[in-house]
Amino acid sequence: MEFLGLPNMKAKTFEQQIGIPEDPGQVYLDAERKAYLAAWLANPERPLWVYGPTGCGKTHLAKWIAHHTRRGLIRFSANGSTDVEDLVGHLTLVDGEVIHQDGPITTGMRQGQMVVIDEGDLIAPDVLTALHAVLEGEPLVLNKGGVVTVVPRPGFQIIVTANSRGDGANRNSYKGTKELNQATLNRFYRIEMDYMPSEIEMDLIKAKAPRSLKGLVSSYVKAANAIRAAAKAQTIERGMSTRDLISWVEFTPVFRETGASARDSMVMALNAVFSGGLEDNERQAVKALATSCFA
């Protein structure tokens, strides 16, 4: 089977399960990153650490992997207070009986599913250290109301998405990221991602843009890249994903039909699909960046 355009590479697939995500669409990787991904897919023994700037498609890649390897996917969003129990579960009282309620990792182990831990570099180092055996593919031993051993079914896999490599090298660029134990990081196979090249993104957007906006696609892509640069510089919270960009282009003519001017339609669509969730000063910064690209 040809995989990722590499005819000699084969991906390991699994029995169909519940929770398999829909095909998220094409993954855009340069030749080197594609080779790294293909090698891991052919021999996915280690968990995967996918890192890169906000909005570059890390979770999109995880969904793509789950879909094409026929595995269910469980997503968990981590933060600085995530602890071991958040990941493997905890004791709870049900009908007067104390039982262990599984977390995302134990659920994935029992069902043979992929577990995607978003923002994994926000987790405290000692939490991931406690999971070393699981990261090596070994059973998880729980001592919660009695010793329970959870054996991973075929198909179980952990994928961590993060802004950093996990080694603390760019903590100044991404607030809250931790410098993880090197022994933890050595258990991962790491792939770096970035935004797709402008020329490829322009072709993609042109194919989806309404006829009235095809002549402005270069301005939309230029604005998206300006927003991404601001996110890398930490001027704003997050960068614009290609999905955000597509939605922005698609919603602009919808607002135009409400009677808004061409410029206001562009700004309103941007606010609706991307900047509406930002702080006011960041929203104004995004607006200024975008409008300057359409001048």
Image (cartoon, rainbow, N blue to C red):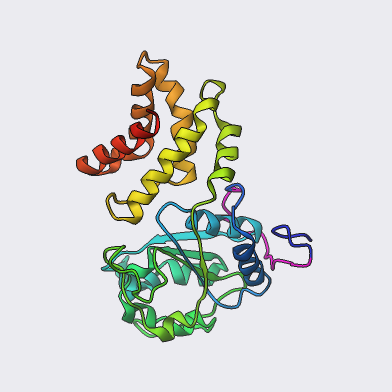
Q: Is residue 209 left or right of residue 293?
A: right
Quadrant showing the C terminus? top left
The quarter holding residue 207 reads: top right
> Which x, y percent locates residue 104?
43, 66
Residue plotted at (60% across, 60% down): 65
> Which x, y percent locates residue 294?
40, 29
Residue plotted at (38% across, 44% down): 226
| In the image, farthest residue toward the top | 259
Residue plotted at (33% across, 73% down): 85
Predominant SS of the magenta segment: loop
Front residue of 132 and 193: 193
Quadrant showing the N terminus? bottom right
> Which x, y percent locates residue 86?
34, 69
Q: Please say whether residue 158 is visible from this viewpoint.
A: yes
Residue plotted at (45% across, 70% down): 105
Front residue of 167 and 123: 167
Magenta residue span: 8-23
Inspect the magenta stretch and tell me whether residue 281 lies in it.
no
The answer to whether residue 61 is above or below residue 253 is: below
Q: Is residue 283 left or right of residue 5?
A: left
Q: How many marks?
A: 0
Inspect the magenta stretch and tell me whether residue 18 lies in it.
yes
The quarter holding residue 118 reads: bottom left
The answer to whether residue 18 is above or below residue 265 is: below
> Which x, y percent locates residue 15?
68, 63
The quarter holding residue 32 reads: bottom right
